[in-house]
Image (cartoon, rainbow, N blue to C red):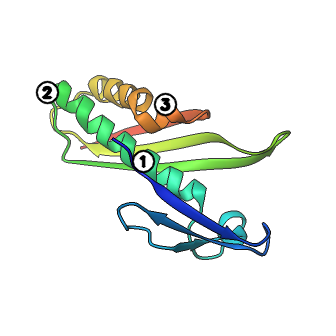
Amino acid sequence: MKRNATAVWEGDLSHGAGALTTQSGVLDKQPYGFRTRFEDAPGTNPEELIAAAHAGCFSMALSNVLGEAGLRAERIETRAEVVLEKTDDGFAITAVHLVLEANVPHATQEAFEAAAMKAKTGCPVSKLLNAEITLKATLLD
């Protein structure tokens, strides 16, 4: 399976502008730029898209791991916070913090935590990232 996206950038870093388009069309010439990435201007940026990809991938991986254990989640909600920092080599994504809340009937705390950790390491996006990945997992009643 292969998926693709296209980025077009015009101009210099601080005054230029770009547009992102995904194969599915969910993003179609979605604008991004310096201000959406490094300031609080409206729009998207690469780190936000990585966060969305990681949260989605992890949630699906957890659903799979729970299913393998004979459990079914009623709801899985994952927030991924991507940390972009200036390093000696320029900017780098140094960490991703996953915050999970899930309703999983009949799951023990131990089984839930084990499934969450297995999903964290098994998720393809986790495997892709060269960053520290932390997880706070809360099993809701």
Residue 110 found in image quarter: top left
Which mark sits nearer the N-terminus, 1 or 3? 1
Which mark sits nearer the N-terminus, 2 or 1? 1
Task: Return the x and y of residue 34 as percentages of the image width and height.
Answer: 72, 68
Q: Which amino acid, by three-letter code, is at mark 1?
A: Ala
Q: Is residue 78 left or right of residue 88?
A: left
Front tag of 2 and 1: 1
Nearest the eye: 10 or 61: 10
User: Which quarter of the image is occupied by the C terminus?
Assistant: top left
Q: Which amino acid, by three-letter code, is at mark 3?
A: Lys
Q: Residue at x 18, y 47 (%)?
A: 74
CA gap, disc 2 and disc 1: 23 Å
Helix, strand or loop at label 1? It is helix
For label 1, count other residues whose C-alpha is less than 10 Å away and answer few (under 14), some (14-19) or many (20+).
Answer: many
Q: Which residue is mark 2?
A: 70
Nearest the eye: 14 or 61: 14
Q: Residue at x 40, y 34 (%)?
A: 123
Nearest the eye: 112 or 78: 78
Label drawn at residue 55: 1
Residue 138 found in image quarter: top left
Task: Return the x and y of residue 120 as percentages of the image width and height.
Answer: 42, 32
For label 2, count other residues whose C-alpha is less than 10 Å away and answer few (under 14), some (14-19) or many (20+).
Answer: few
Q: Which amino acid, by three-letter code, is at mark 2?
A: Gly
Q: Which residue is mark 3?
A: 127
For label 3, count other residues whose C-alpha is less than 10 Å away and answer few (under 14), some (14-19) or many (20+).
Answer: few
Front tag of 1 and 3: 3
Task: Return the x and y of residue 2 as percentages of the image width and height.
Answer: 38, 44
Helix, strand or loop at label 2? It is loop
